Image (spheres, grey):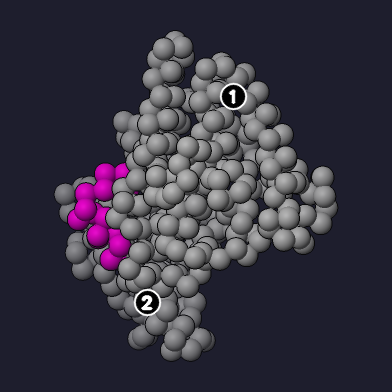
């Protein structure tokens, strides 16, 4: 395929493609091929490339839709860069290159070059043993800042999951993969989808087909997803899956019922899960940190979406303001120092 045979070629802006990255990818996403690229002065960066092969047998609309998705991701990344969102991955360049091993129009490859991360949260914290919880909570602090930055600009990420959290040198983390975002102006190609992200990380209401009524409803999924990153890293299983398992133990047909009707079951499953979660946190971090962390996950992932978020606020945007969780994560980090848990971590 044109986008899978780029090693040795260069982009018009001067990045030379040096190596294809073949580590596992989670979902389909944009079906991008990933590369390491190098500039003339030796800087290394990361490139995602895609071509039109996937829509080759489709209609003109399919081709147009794919190009629109690419253009939208590129534009929104450029916007976030212009707005200096410090915790959103930075694009270095983007454009189109021609792979002349193929004939037009299939020779067209669309690419985006990014600053290169050291790894993603899935690789660093989920797929291997680690005990660097301090760095993990620093990463979560940065993810909350990223959500604040995006939400403030009227952008909902909609696909926050372990493989989309990128780690950089010196304990810096950023949100990546803006491939499924929606924006308040409605320019996103996904604006008509209530939830464009990965269903494995979707909140409960998505499974019940509850549709988005107003733009701020989309923050519900982002806030849920951040809380569930914390849960999954401690417990080793995604919260969405754990909650479904627990509720189906109580009532096997729970997902055939109406959302409101089934909530009582999900809420009692959730409290069982939060009890186990607290105990796991207490074992690792002690009770002070366990209390804050369980409180955060309990608020961010609460099964009743109308009650999700800061308990003392009823109205949005305050109820779903990510800033609250930025400051909670800062508290967790501070407690690591106070509790003397810092000595044996980086
Ligand atoms: N800037 C980067 N530096 C290093 N690795 C990156 C970078 N951006 C993404 N990656 C890696 O590539 C993977 C896929 O990137 P991304 O999520 O942006 O693409 P995608 O096409 O939406 O794929 P997926 O469906 O797996 O989410 C990430 O999970 C991460 O491991
Ligand atoms: Mg991704």
- State the residue at coordinates (34%, 71%): 187
Q: Quadrant of the N terminus?
A: bottom left
Residue in the picture at 36% in, 85% down: 105
**Location of residue 216 by image quarter:** bottom left
Whole-percent x and y of residue 253?
81, 57
Which is nearer the eye, 257 or 86? 257
Q: Is mark 1 within 8 Å of ligand 1?
A: no
Q: Is residue 116 left or right of residue 262?
A: left
Q: Decide: marks 2, 1 in contact (CB < 8 A)?
A: no
Question: Quarter-wise, where is residue 283 in the image?
Answer: top right
Residue beneath the point at 46% across and 12% down:
339
Instruction: Specify the segment rendered in magenta.
Output: 74-89
In the picture of the structure, the residue carrying the numbered disc 2 is 67
- Disc 2 and disc 1: Cα gap in Å? 45 Å
Name above or below for residue 272 compared with residue 15: above
Instruction: Say which residue label 1 marks.
Output: 281
Q: Could you tell me residue 165's position as x and y percent?
A: 43, 45
167 lies above or below 178: above
């Amino acid at each position: 395929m044109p986008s899978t045979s780029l090693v040795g070629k260069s982009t018009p802006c001067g990045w030379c493609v040096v190596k294809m990255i073949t580590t596992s990818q989670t979902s389909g996403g944009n079906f991008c091929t990933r590369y390491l690229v190098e500039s003339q002065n030796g800087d290394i960066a990361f490139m995602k490339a895609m071509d039109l092969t996937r829509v080759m047998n489709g209609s003109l609309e399919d081709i147009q839709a794919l190009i629109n998705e690419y253009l939208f991701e590129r534009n929104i990344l450029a916007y976030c860069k212009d707005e200096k969102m410090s915790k959103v991955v930075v694009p270095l360049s983007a454009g189109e290159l021609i792979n002349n091993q193929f004939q037009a129009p299939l020779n067209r490859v669309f690419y985006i070059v990014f600053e290169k991360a050291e790894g993603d949260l899935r690789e660093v914290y989920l797929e291997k043993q680690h005990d660097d919880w301090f760095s993990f909570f620093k990463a979560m602090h940065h993810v909350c800042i990223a959500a604040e930055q995006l939400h403030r600009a009227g952008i909902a990420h909609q696909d926050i999951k372990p493989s989309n959290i990128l780690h950089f040198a010196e304990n810096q983390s950023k949100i990546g993969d803006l491939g499924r975002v929606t924006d308040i102006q409605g320019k996103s190609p996904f604006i008509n989808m209530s939830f464009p992200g990965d269903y494995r990380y979707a909140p409960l209401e998505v499974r019940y087909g509850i549709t988005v009524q107003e733009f701020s409803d989309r923050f519900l999924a982002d806030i849920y997803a951040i809380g569930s990153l914390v849960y999954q890293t401690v417990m080793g299983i995604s919260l969405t899956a754990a909650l479904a398992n627990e509720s189906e133990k109580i009532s096997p047909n729970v997902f055939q019922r109406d959302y409101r009707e089934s909530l009582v079951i999900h809420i009692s499953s959730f409290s069982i899960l939060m009890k186990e979660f607290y105990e796991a946190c207490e074992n690792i971090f002690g009770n002070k940190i366990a209390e804050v962390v369980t409180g955060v996950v309990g608020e961010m992932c609460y099964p009743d979406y109308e009650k999700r978020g800061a308990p003392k606020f009823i109205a949005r945007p305050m109820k779903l303001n990510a800033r609250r969780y930025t400051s909670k994560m800062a508290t967790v980090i501070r407690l690591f120092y106070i509790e003397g848990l810092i000595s044996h971590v980086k």
